[in-house]
Amino acid sequence: RKTAVMLQLPLVVTAQVDLVLVLVSLLAFWTRLSRLSYPNAVVFDEVYYGQFVSLYMKRVFFIDDSGPPLGHMILAFGAYLGGFDGNFLWNRIGADYPSSVSVWSLRLLPALCGSLCVPLVYLLTLELNFSHLAALGAALLLLLENSLIVQSRFMLLESVLIFFVLLAFLSYLRFHNAPNSSWSRFSWLLLSGASCAAAVGVKYMGVFSYLLLLGVASLHTWNLIGDHTLNVCVQCVCRFMCLVVVPVLLYVFWFYIHLGLLSHSGPHDQLMSSAFQASLQGGLSRITQGQPLEVAYGSQVTLRSSASQPIPCWLHSHRANYPVRYENGRGSSHQQQVTCYPFKDVNNWWIIKDPGKQKLVVGSPPQPVRHGDVIQLVHGMTSRFLNSHDVAAPMSPHAQEVSGYIDFNVSMAAQNLWRVHISNREAESDVWKTILSEVRLVHVNTSAVLKLSGVSLPDWGFRQLEVVAEKLFKGHSSVLGWTVEEHRYGTSQEQKEREAELHSPTHIDIDRKMSFWAKFLELQWKMLTVKQEDSEHKYSSSPLEWITMETNIAYWLHSSTNAQIHLIGNPVSWGVANLSLLAYQLLAAVYLVRRRRGIKDLPDAVWCRFSCLGCVCVGGWVVNFVPFLLMEKTLFLYHYLPALCYLYVLSPALLEHAHTHLLSSAIQRQALGVCVSAVLLTVFLSYRNFCPLTYGSPELSANQLQGLRWRETWDILYRHR
Amino acid sequence: VSVQGRANFKILRDTSTLRNRKSFPTSAPNTPVSKGQSCPTGNDAQSSNGTSAQFSSRLSDRHMCTVLLVLVVGLSFSTRLYKITEPPHVCWDETHFGKMGSYYINRTFFFDVHPPLGKMLIGLAGYMTGYDGTFPFMKPGDKYEHHNYWGMRGFCAVLGSLLPIFAYLIVLELSRSETAALIAASLLIFDTGCITISQYILLDPILMFFIMAAVLSMVKFNQPFSASWWLWLVLTGVNLAGALGVKFVGLFVILLVGLNTVWDLWRLLGDLSLSLVDIAKHFLARVVGLILFPLFFYVTVFAIHFVVLNKSGPGDGFFSSAFQSRLIGNNLHNASMPEYLAYGSTITVKNLRIAGGYLHSHWHLYPEGVGARQQQVTAYLHKDYNNLWLVHRQNTQSPTPDLVRHGDIIRLEHKETTRNLHSHLHEAPLTKKHFQVTGYGNNGTGDANDLWQVEVCGGQKGDLVKVLRSKVRFLHRATGCVLYSSGKTLPKWGWEQVEVTCSPYLKETPSSQWNIEDHINPKLPNISLSVLKPHFLEILLESHIVMIRGNSGLKPKDNEMNSKPWHWPINYQGLRFSGVNETEYRVYLLGNPVLWWMNLASLGLYLIMVAVASVALQRGFSLKHSHVLMRGGGLLLLGWLLHYAPFYTMGRVLYYHHYFPAMLFSSMLTGITLDILLKSADLLLRPPYSDWLQRAGQLVLLFTVLHSFYLFHPLSYGMTGPLAHEPGSSMAGLKWMDSWEF
């Protein structure tokens, strides 16, 4: 019988197309994508992201503390599609792109993401159980928001971030609204988790939205626990997998691609550990290629401090002595200075000497230095011994001075024996290995440890970093560790041996020594801890100024005319957004108090919808805005855009709520309808008004520009002609 | 087959008993816990007996309660007051707070980043016990000799001794369990950190006293509108004001009480048996008792502070000219100087923003990369000869002392370095939107960028510039910007003084307004000026802003090992109170590690227990102690969080002792957690065994606390002789972490 039924089935395709959705999407594409390659010049932060795109094209390693690598990779992917070869110097805002650079493709992906935000907001409003009209309102507000358009049309990351955040919420709500029985809805949850991972991968700011989503999801899951009809454990585990485990794995995966792509050494190498550097092609790995692995007596080495703060540096000495008296009157030993020097230099070379023997060459077979051995360190260029004694160090008087020993015949005996202590040894008799071993040098006479204090010396020390020996050492600290970076076996006893040829007894292939996880952890840690000099920018602003849009950012000014692009929001929409935020809070407070007193204004289902709207939209605004109040970073107006998008979802939904539940008479409803149309019209007019500053054309006269300066604090540029 | 059968039987029996036990509390869940049950020893056995037996048992219970309380009081006071006068020299921050106590006795004005109540109390305690305020408290290690320092230390120690007692009462109120209260109290009594921090002239014991007293009064007020209710309400308010009056950390306990009150009001609002009028009464009572009354008390403290300190002292420069004129001995007190600004005068210029500094320059250049490499111009809060400037005409030296008028173009020459105040189109060092201000030229010869136009705010062309009273702006001729003090602290190269810029935004703000404070011109007659005396509220606001600035100005030094908040709960590193070497008397502030780690573990344990209890509740089961666990424990956990988490966001320099208020809450939480954990033994074992397990657990706990105190007591009561890593030391083998420095 079944086959009979199947035979009777006609082949029918039923498709429902939401024409409104299609229309707003097309409009979004038109506003975001038209004339994308104008201006054909570097605009604002393109100068910042561009350098990373170039480095991706050249596959050169870099480290950027502003965010995880996915955003950069997306931009680089766009560049790759356009055939960009990375040969462009991103040095100045306003510099013209050469014809070889396909500007359109550089900006395509962010613009696509920005356009897709509009239909996403439409669908999100529907998933929040509001009407198509509310959804249309939200989409229009987003569509006509000048700041979002500006931010989408250039090689910047905010639109990508907003896209993923909206997608995450949309797919989570799809999952939540789907009937409990269907298992296919978990694909929506999976999509939600993946979008969260992408959002966090684009900018750290995405973490806040992710946490909000987790909060909403755990609330829903918590209600689930009380439900006895379901298999709660399985449900919980599934949700946990999709929303926690998958995002974490994906986040790591972005780094996997990142590290896979960037295989060449580059300008930021020095921030990383020696082992990490050696895993990159070129740079240190070229220097270290073919170096002997085991440090032996007679080895010539450079010793790099494990600390990356304040800057990476090498143990150094030079023909200059400590001044007899410091500025503050304290005396010194007047022996040769030992410092830490942040550049490669011939004075960074030290020779490891066996205290019992005179020779400075490696014997055959080489006698390796092991953990616990006592050595002397001879400075290559000056032949002074590394020495420490009970004299206060120049800048850190609580610690001992470290010097190159000079015998002044003042009954100050040399104390130049150091014990090698390998911190990351695997066995007690482990051999000191190039690059891989982190050693501490313990002074035998005083048991003080050679340490980089991190303070720069005054002029007499050429502003190099101070090195001391400190008695009381606390736990594990990177300032105590030193690594052999460059290494060769010394062959000639003569002073001219500096140019000694490289020996190659044991080839090592450190490339494969460092696992992905070790690299990932190191990179992530460095990205979170590397501090760039934070200084105020001409267009930086404080978060409280964003709400009222006190500031703008000038993105680009034509090199000869008054044509310019600014990040300025649509003032009417911002007003609407702020009003709705305020109104929602007031309304929610009144409802809550009245419910508490047992007066139920709304049926439970409506109340549920109303509070869900608040959780997502007001919650989204809060988590994307409040953290900035606590941050000490340099902040810009564009940091507010994700928070703003939530408010644009809130406004129409709130109006619909007012329309259906607060206004009773038909006249009131009609009045509301008229008001809303009027507001939408002004939104459109103000969008049109600011269009010249959004698209950079047409050029306006000084008077017209003056007319657009709605706020005293906006910086609009005029060219004197 | 038989083995399997028996196993099945066993499982069956187990589940049945489990179900029995779980259903027990649901059958009688709502019986309110009466006060008589607060000593639960042997309650179950005796409840079935006759009324007389019950009465006598209650009597003995009450006896027991009193005995326990007396025990806690005795132990607490004896541990804190033991060796209170040792060491007889200044320890750690005593050098600050002792000094400030002395200032109160001497009535000299000073500046500190904390509100005054704590130091006032220290001063009062010193005054009452015969300390005359003459000891200079120069630096840690100075011998006290004949000075009466024991009174101030004793006062702090007494307040510190009250902490375990308060903890006992708070936990008793929250959990109705003597055992929990006793655990909490003993954790505090035998904590070496709490002992050490209570024994010296510091603000912390006073602060913690107010915090704990506020929490105690908060948990005590629960019988609406009775006399005791009002008493506790008012006491809560007083203690909140006191906590804030000692240190701004008091804000956290205010937040705790505030959240608790909001929760309480929310609960009352949901109680439909109460009319709206009743709720309004509740609300108003709390507004008065917890907001208005403490505010009044807090303001009174400041009023006393300003009345007592009426002599000029080291803190003058932080305050405005008007404020300084109040202080006897300050040069502005009954000042006498030429009334109108004149050419050829030597002046100091003070910024009008609150806590704005004097226009200052010195023999140091801006470093490379920060604008032009010319001499720095800053704002400086202290009085200094580098604050002196000479007023010159545009070009020629003026022979006669003509008066400066609104609209005149002048040149300001720095007296010490003979450079002119100068600005140009370079970015300012920190405020990049403004222009850099430098000292330029030599012996008064510079260029056109040295010219400034004087503008009296609200004045017209030709108006004279009144010293002290006119608000003056200096407009830069060449660029049209206005001299501005941004209030941002320069980095080390600028000696952490305040940035001075030239702002292109011409809005009139106090930051761009200045007044002429000192005015020296021998050619003009001096006239006595009575400066407008500031209003009390103005002084209050000003001193708060100065304090907040001071607090945020305490930035960690680059090369110092500074304490991070995550160090604290794991007891990573203490503070040296006294002594470094083997020969010295050493005191080291470090919590008893066993107890602190126990606290840390119980925090985790608490979270697990709450998770289990709430999942059970959500699934429809109710566990016996879940109410105490969630309500009482939740309050303490919130207290801990509020006193700990904010430190992660603070930019200022942090110290280990900042954790102690949080540690008090953590210890109380441990009391409740461990008590409930031991009592929950009956979920695993049958009655007689579960009781034994409970007793055994309590004994082990007691022994651990006492033994760890025995091991670590030298940290508080002083160590001499070899350091811990040498064999002969009293602390040999106890340096469990490398980071401990004893």
Image (cartoon, grey):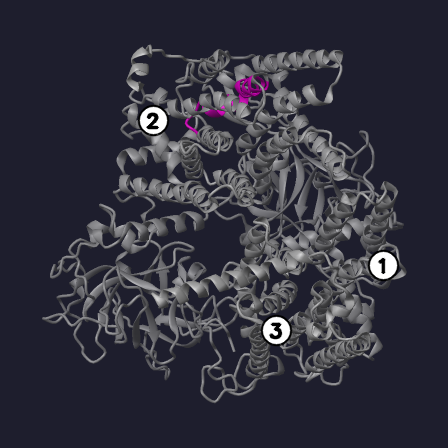
According to the picture, the residue beneath numbered tag 3 turns out to be B193
According to the picture, the residue beneath numbered tag 2 turns out to be A78
Nearest the eye: B378 or A16: A16
| Residue furthest left in the image | A364
Q: Chain of mark 2?
A: A
Q: Which mark is residue A348?
A: none
> Is A42 on the left or on the right of B386, as rendered?
left
Mark 2: secondary structure = helix
Q: Chain of mark 3?
A: B
Q: Nearer the viewer, mark 3 or mark 2?
A: 3
Q: Nearer the viewer, mark 2 or mark 1?
A: 1
Does the CB distance between marks 2 and 1 fall below 8 Å?
Answer: no
Magenta stretch bounds: A134-156
According to the picture, the residue beneath numbered tag 1 turns out to be B229
Q: Is residue A665 magenta?
A: no
Distance in Å between CA atoms under marks 2 and 1: 70 Å
Nearest the eye: B241 or B326: B241
Nearest the eye: A140 or B553: A140
Residue drawn at x 34%, y 49% is A520
Q: Is residue A135 magenta?
A: yes
